[in-house]
Amino acid sequence: MRHGIAKQWLKAVLITALLTYAIPPEWNSIPAYALSSSSSNSSYVASTAEIQQKLIEGLEARQNTITIKFKGKTKNLEKILKQAMRDALDQDPYTKYIVDRYSYSWRGTSSTAKINFQVYYRESVEQSAYVNKRVEGILISIVQPEMNNHQRIKAIHDYVVKNLKYDEDLQKYTAYEGLRTGEAVCQGYSLLTYQLLKTAGFASLIVEGTAGGQAHAWNLVLLDGKWYHLDTTWDDPLSNGPEQVRYDYYLRTDNEMKVDHKWTKKYPAASTLYRETLRLLSSKDGSEKGVYTALEEQLGYSLYYADAAVSNGVGLQEKVKQSITFGKETVTVRYTGNENQLIKDLSMLYNLDLADIRYSARPLEGTKDLRVEIFWRTLN
């Protein structure tokens, strides 16, 4: 008899941003089969759809052995089993990405077969139940009744970024391990993000591909009828403090993600710029106008307004003083000038009794200006 085992999960190391990533495999299997006499007609299935349903039920229960009796032509049974397992896994992205590997074998005749699937999981049924219970509790604590969908997705994103740390040892792949230890690889980030979004009522997917040329996984989420990319791993760089959150990969379009992310499978198109969505919503009068304006500020989209840019040291001083009044020691500004001039203008901030002034600068997408993050320590 020949037994087949699926490809192992791919591991890779990404030097950029000091992160490493891991994603699951393509689902392939090689059957083993032998002839034997058929058994009774009870509990037989006769189609790919029926096999798929049996697999869905077994996978949901985290069964290690799933046995199915099949009645029909077995000439193309290998093709049928592959398709049934592929479709069963695609029904539930969470289960798909906690299946470590599987194999299958069958015995029968030209018209009947007894099929055995052997499935190995990274997360047990008890561990998945723990995740579900924790997810419900997390949502109660971070999602307030008055929040709209835009605020809820941001709350979920921020929770994952703040409460997970990247597992540099590449040992923790699941949402369970992430919740129990506070560490996971990108697969754990995307699984926890998926489960939080799903439980909160959002349609979501797990995307597999590459980022910076290395294997990676992240999410897609449906908001107000539009799909957006959401990468909680890459919004959580190792250099950040535990309470710092970035939004560089928050509700992005395909074109925005394609700068350093790639995927080969077909996923729903993400073509709407989220900052334009928020600008439109914040321009309308209504009870939620302030909500959308606040989101623009929190996500850095207010930098795209015409009056947001500064071009000299005096302008930088004013932005820093505004931030200090709110008790902050950081501010993000839009700067119209080159980096050499920026360094000269930043020196004027020492007139505000500040110490340890640091900055990071990069192009502000869609403009010719710089997006500058300034950090300092207040002396008094």
Image (cartoon, helix red, strand yellow):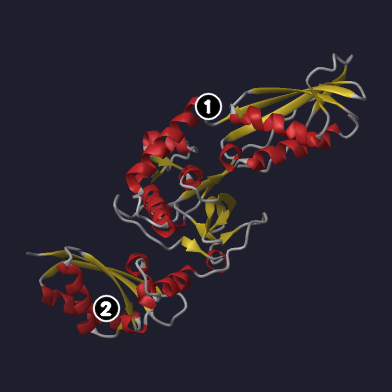
Which residue is rendered at x = 91% and y = 21% of the image? 109
Q: Which quadrant holds the N terminus?
A: top right
Say whether residue 49 is left or right of residue 63. right
23 or 199, nearer to the observer: 199
- The residue lying furthest to the right in this view is 110
User: Would you call the spot at circle 1 few (<14 residues within 10 Å), some (14-19), or many (20 or more)?
Assistant: some
**Of the residues shown, which amino acid type is indicated by label 2?**
Ile
Say if 301 sits above or below 56 in the image.
below
Say if 269 sits above or below 200 in the image.
below
Regarding residue 84, the answer to whether it shows in the image is yes
Which residue is rendered at x = 16% and y = 63% of the image? 327
Across and down, in percent, residue 304 comes to 39, 78
Q: Secondary structure at mark 1?
A: helix
Which residue is rendered at x = 23% and y = 82% of the image? 315
Say whether residue 228 is left or right of residue 67. left
Across and down, in percent, residue 273 comes to 51, 70
Judged by depth in the image, the label closer to the viewer, 2 or 1, is 1
Contact flag, marks 2 and 1 (Cβ < 8 Å): no
- Rounded to the nearest angstrom, the CA distance separating label 2 from label 1 is 56 Å
Say if 118 sits above or below 312 in the image.
above
- The residue lying furthest to the left in this view is 380
On residue 125, the disc is 1
Image-quadrant location for residue 44: top right
User: Would you call the spot at circle 2 few (<14 residues within 10 Å), some (14-19), or many (20 or more)?
Assistant: few
56 or 14, nearer to the observer: 56
**Of the residues shown, which amino acid type is indicated by label 1?**
Val
Which residue is rendered at x = 61% and y = 39% of the image? 96
* Residue under pointer 2: 343
Image-quadrant location for residue 287: bottom left
